[in-house]
Amino acid sequence: MAEDISVEMIDVRTAIDKAVPAGSTIDGVHLSNRGYDAWVATLQSGIRKMM
């Protein structure tokens, strides 16, 4: 299961990279460097809780 989640997380991040213009924000979080990584980590955590 953990391996599946890892693969899905990469796919989610790739999809976000393609869909979200550079410098955009999601829920007020700036999607660059540390802020982006924090947002992705929050997303991953939420997905894990739903599984």
Image: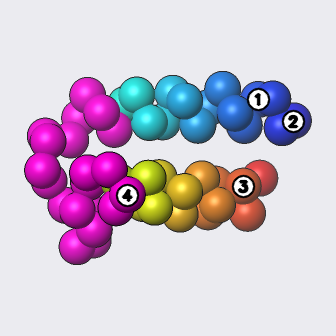
Give the amino acid at mark 3.
Answer: Arg
Tell me the SS state at disc 1: helix
The residue that appears at 72% across and 55% down in the rendered structure is: 48
Q: CA distance from mark 3 to mark 4?
A: 21 Å
3 or 2: tag closer to the N-terminus: 2
Q: Which residue is mark 4?
A: 34
* 11 is within the stretch colored magenta: no
The span picked out in magenta is 16-35
Give the amino acid at mark 2.
Answer: Met
Give the amino acid at mark 1.
Answer: Asp
Can residue 43 be seen? no
The residue that appears at 44% across and 36% down in the rendered structure is: 13
| Residue 4 numbered tag | 1
Q: CA distance from mark 3 to mark 2?
A: 10 Å
Tell me the SS state at disc 4: helix
Q: CA distance from mark 1 to mark 3?
A: 11 Å
Q: CA distance from mark 2 to mark 1?
A: 5 Å
Tell me the SS state at disc 2: loop
Marks 2 & 1, CB-CB < 8 Å contact: yes
